[in-house]
Amino acid sequence: MHRSFHHLSREERKKYCRMRQYFLRHMKNIAGEKTLQGFEIGNMIRKIGNMYDTILNVEYGDSEISNRRLEILAQLYIISEIDKSEKITPTSLSHFQSVNKNTISSLINGLESQGLLVREKDANDRRMIRLKITDAGRDVVKALIPTQIDYMNVISSELTDIEKEQLIDLLTKLMVSMKNNIRHQGVFRRRQHSFRR
């Protein structure tokens, strides 16, 4: 597990800050006149996401439940509570989780091997697979989600309620901006491909 910045020694903190400044200075040299704000936002969000994934993985019984897997189970649990007969497809789940099909397939395989969900063929279209949470999966959600919520509130406790609302609003706005401008990602990938030729 990664140590937090606050648990580093004074010398390690100084070294970290020097390295960060050195890195940003050289990134600025590469970027020229372009601002690094978008880059810094993305870098910070990635680091925070990695920290959340690391610290929110928990032991349950004989196996570990990652934060990503728990989110999927919670989603399947809620869907089944709304409508017992409703089951979600892997494709729909990948859209809900904002991850690609390969990632969602790996997460589903892990949950299935842990006995926490099952795949069922669609009654109307045998080619389509739908996912259903098992009783064991429901037990995991009921046991872990309240604890996870408490812990996530603790790790964000240095922000005031107003700051949390502001941060949620800003992140929501950023997400909308990303979705509206996602077409640039395709352009960037094509450019990367041309560099490898």
Image (tube, grey):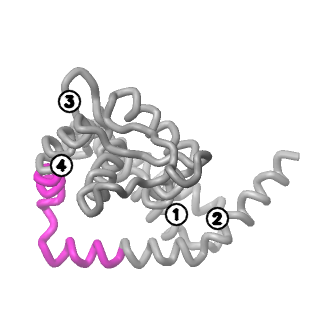
Q: Are marks 2 and 1 in contact (CB under 8 Å)?
A: yes
The span picked out in magenta is: 149-170
Q: Is residue 40 magenta?
A: no
The disc, 2 or 4, on the residue closer to the chain's N-terminal end is 2
Helix, strand or loop under label 2: helix
Q: From the image, state whether disc 3 or disc 1 is nearer to you.
A: 3
Q: Is residue 156 magenta?
A: yes
Q: From the image, state whether disc 2 or disc 4 is nearer to you.
A: 4
The disc, 1 or 4, on the residue closer to the chain's N-terminal end is 1
The amino acid type found where label 3 is placed reads Tyr
Q: Quadrant of residue 26?
A: bottom right
What percent of the width, then of the height, locates residue 132?
37, 45
The amino acid type found where label 4 is placed reads Ile
What residue did someone put label 3 on?
60
The crowd level at tag 1 (other Cα within 10 Å; few <14, some 14-19, many 20+) is few
Q: Are marks 4 and 3 in contact (CB under 8 Å)?
A: no
Q: Are marks 3 and 2 in contact (CB under 8 Å)?
A: no
Residue at image x 67%, y 71%? 183
The amino acid type found where label 2 is placed reads Ala
Residue at image x 38%, y 35%? 111
Residue at image x 27%, y 24%? 63
Helix, strand or loop under label 4: helix
What residue did someone put label 4 on?
145
The secondary structure that dominates the magenta segment is helix
